[in-house]
Amino acid sequence: MKRRAYLATAAAVTVAGCSALSSSDDADKDDDDKDDNKPSDPVNEDPGSFDEFEDLSKWTVMEGSLTADEERTYAGSQSARMESDGSEDRIMIKREFDSPRDLSDEFPALAFTSDHDVNPVVQLADTDGNRLLLQCAVNADDPFTRHDLGIVDTAGTPDLSSINHTKISVWAGDRELSLWCDDYHFVERPDTGKVLLQFPENTTEVGSEAAPLLAEHDIPATVFVNTDYVGSSGYLSSTDLESLQSDGWTVASGGATGTDITQHDADRREAEISDAAAWLDEHGFDDAYFSYGLNRYDESALELVEEYHDLAFVGGYAGHGNVTNPYLAPRAATPDADEATQLLEWAAEYRTITTLSYRSLEEVSFEAMLSTLADLESAGEIDVVTPDDIASDYLH
């Protein structure tokens, strides 16, 4: 069954689950962003392509170097290659907007590739120097693919209605590395923040511990099923899954076994995805959504997921705008209480799409997170949604 075609260039990567919030030096703390000659009237432009890096003279090199690369591109005739020779801690480029840009309803997204595992940061700085920092995970030798950027930090109280400039940076340390950027574009954000709760495994803990707590607040979630293990010791049965579905849960695919798909041969890879999709369809569950086993994938896995599913989730940085790459929708992997609270508050304040995924409920104060979530939802500051909602209403 051929589903929505989207992936322009599949990524050959291996990704582990990322922390909900960044603690790396990528979250730049520079203090040179205040503009004393700021224009006064922000410009409100439609979301869409902003810069395909056809004219690099629009960018100022702050650290490292910047060159055009006509051999590695995602859009247009060239990309921007940011490079470190190992002598500087990071690479950074900056572009001023012609006039302050009103990003009240938009968020940035970019296509990236790199020769190292990196976590690029995109900054938005307002006319007073306050900044919003967003981040994504890019892995070594990943061909160009779009990445949705999640919030990792703020400096001051950024006013997204009057953004003066943007920066792209990556931590290099003492490494010689390159980061290629292309297709800088802006996507819409929801009118209200959207939150998804997920469980990447169909263990009995989901039914015995998570489900009752969620039911107390009338909050739905998604469980991704390893279909080969349904009814086995430690795993939910078909009857358990039917009960969750009747309570408003989404029962979706975690693959036949939930193993690292990149370690399988071609036949096993297809069986891991196709067998699980067939089982879900036969048992009346949803085969449209997928979770990468152990948050790992590569080019062929992405191609298979595109063939069998509409939307797929992987560990990354939560808190982004409308999804630009539905086969790499990022989620925060098992955030602790403080991380989850911060992500929920940002979801409300910045109207982001924020997915929280819990492999285990131990030591994460899940009940406290639910209380915060329920309070924000009751106040009308966020909506708890399902993958159906994202697939139908929040794809770029």
Image (cartoon, rainbow, N blue to C red):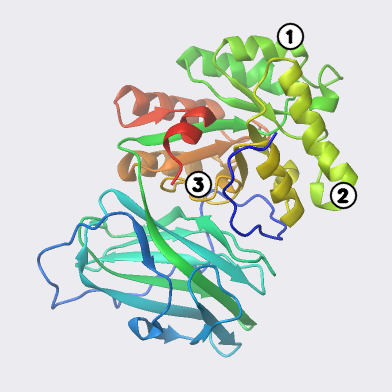
* Horizontal side of residue 155 vs 231, given as left or right: left
Q: CA distance from mark 1 to mark 2?
A: 32 Å
Q: Quadrant of residue 107?
A: bottom left
Q: Is residue 155 above or below residue 391?
A: below
Q: Is residue 202 above or below residue 303?
A: above
Residue 286 in picture, x, y percent from top left: 64, 23
Q: Quadrant of residue 242?
A: top right
10 Å crowding of disc 1: few (<14), some (14-19), many (20+) = few
Mark drawn on residue 318: 3
Query: Which amino acid type is shown beneath numbered disc 3?
Result: Ala
In the image, what residue occupies the spot 64% across and 19% down? Answer: 209
Residue 120 in picture, x, y percent from top left: 52, 67
In the image, what residue occupies the spot 52% across and 39% down? Answer: 355
Q: CA distance from mark 3 to mark 2?
A: 31 Å
Query: Which amino acid type is shown beneath numbered disc 2?
Result: Ala
Which badge, 3 or 1, comes first in the chain's sequence? Answer: 1
- The one nearer the camera, 27 or 336, is 27
* Horizontal side of residue 109 vs 279, given as left or right: left
Mark drawn on residue 239: 1
Which badge, 1 or 2, comes first in the chain's sequence? Answer: 1
Residue 331 in picture, x, y percent from top left: 56, 44
